[in-house]
Image (cartoon, rainbow, N blue to C red):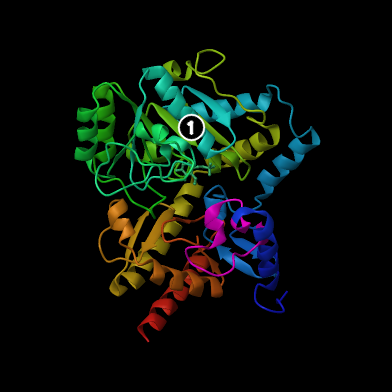
Amino acid sequence: MTPKTRHERSRELFAQAKLMIPGGVNSPVRAFQSVGGTPRFMQKANGAHITDVDGRTYLDYVCSWGPMILGHNHPAVKAAVLQAVENGLSFGAATEAEVTMARLVCDLVPSIDMVRMVNSGTEAVMSAIRAARGYTGRSKIIKFEGCYHGHFDALLVKAGSGVMTAGVPDSAGVPKGTAEDTLTAVYNDIDSVEKLFDENPKEVAAIIIEPLAANMGVVLPQEGFLKKLRALCSANGALLIFDEVITGFRLSLTGAQGYYGVKPDLTTFGKIIGGGMPVGAYGGRRDVMSTIAPVGGVYQAGTLSGNPVAMAAGITQLKILRDNPEIYERVNRLGERLYTGLAGIAEKHGCTVNHTGSLGCLFFTNRPVTDYATAKASDTVRFSHYFKKMLGDGVYLAPSQFEAMFLSAAHTEADVDFTLNCAEDYFRREDD
Ligand code: PLP
């Protein structure tokens, strides 16, 4: 169907939505605020494509911000969900599916002895931090500038330049006291972490990190960085928490920890583990997880946690990934083609491409991007022009410079080549 006028229905819906929903959206980045224009209201998605309410279909590199690694509406995942629905939507009681899910996660990820299901990545992080504090009896947390761990108060801390010894809340409504226990270090700068340990002896409960940072664009951990963090945590009696909400079951079946060969004490999951349903999980060492209620004194609960329909989607997606290792070969090969292709096109125009596997980012800066400060040097106005051109060509990118591109197994070489042609065209026009 060809729309009468361009995104007319999206415009109408956005106008209505803004009257009732803050900013017209249920999650801020969807509002297109940093790129301008009307957010597309989506109606359906299949494979690598997503279709808006005006009938326009886009090649999708958002993939619901990561969960849809098999592509949208995968027939087996859909069938499992429909079958689960037949039995009821929610029981608020233990189910066999939760045992199956726990076994899958414990079998797939060697660092996980025990796991608890929750409903989002934010909840997973919040709960893992509480477990770390409960286990160690310490309050302080080290996070890294530019790493996002959901909208949990203690981790919404402004990433200022250099190391911050006292946290400053990044959001109104976060009490100063909550953020004071959050220490901020510089990604890829091990000295900044050592300094925080030195300044706060026996006070740090945990380091939390995205082992591959994918919320300031994509920033790769430098050789040895994660291993040094592991050693620092062990030496200082602090726990190492890998936030694998994006990287879990994406960089590999064993996530970033398997990919980089570093074993965290706790791990948080979201996105892929739910197959597109609202699911998160946290897990790790048996002694730490044994502090969680009802076994231990760290309270954490959830009315809908382990929901049977959500478990059906997640279990099916994880089993497909486990049983078909060629999926990782495929998405990583597509990643290589896409991101090296983009680098070839864009680097001569003053851009930088960072990528690992199926995750990548085109930064509008010619400096190497290794941390938050270098990511922030990107020209976001140029990015917004690029974004709009790509959208116009039918390529749906995340509407922010500081997000990753997500590939799925449903993308094809032809999709990648089409995307590269669109990007090439953008840079050609920029030159005119
Ligand atoms: N941690 C990371 C690394 C994330 O990327 C996100 C969300 O994008 C979260 C945590 C929060 O997850 P959710 O949005 O499911 O609450």
**Considering the image in quadrants, where does the C terminus appear?**
bottom left
Q: Is residue 249 left or right of residue 96?
A: left
The amino acid marked with disc number 1 is Met
The answer to whether residue 178 is seen in the rendering is yes
In the image, the segment drawn in magenta is 23-45
Q: Secondary structure at mark 1?
A: helix
Q: What residue sits 43% from the left and 29% below the top?
A: 129
The residue lying at 62 percent from left, 28 percent from top is 302
Residue 334 vertical placement versus 324 (above, below): below
Of 24 and 330, the residue lying toward us: 24
Residue 180 place in picture, x, y as percent: 35, 33
Asked if residue 38 lies in the magenta stretch, the reply is yes
Which sits in the foreground, 45 or 158?
A: 158
Quarter of the image holding residue 141?
top left
Q: Quadrant of residue 93?
A: top right
Inspect the magenta stretch and tell me whether residue 274 lies in it. Answer: no
Q: Specify the quadrant of the image occupied by residue 394.
A: bottom right
Q: Position of residue 233 (x, y in %)?
A: 28, 27
Residue 174, position in %: x, y? 46, 39
Residue occupied by mark 1: 126
How many circles with numbers are drawn on the protein? 1
Q: Residue at x 58, y 31 (%)?
A: 118
Residue 330 x, y percent position in the rendering: 48, 53
Q: Residue furthest bottom?
A: 432
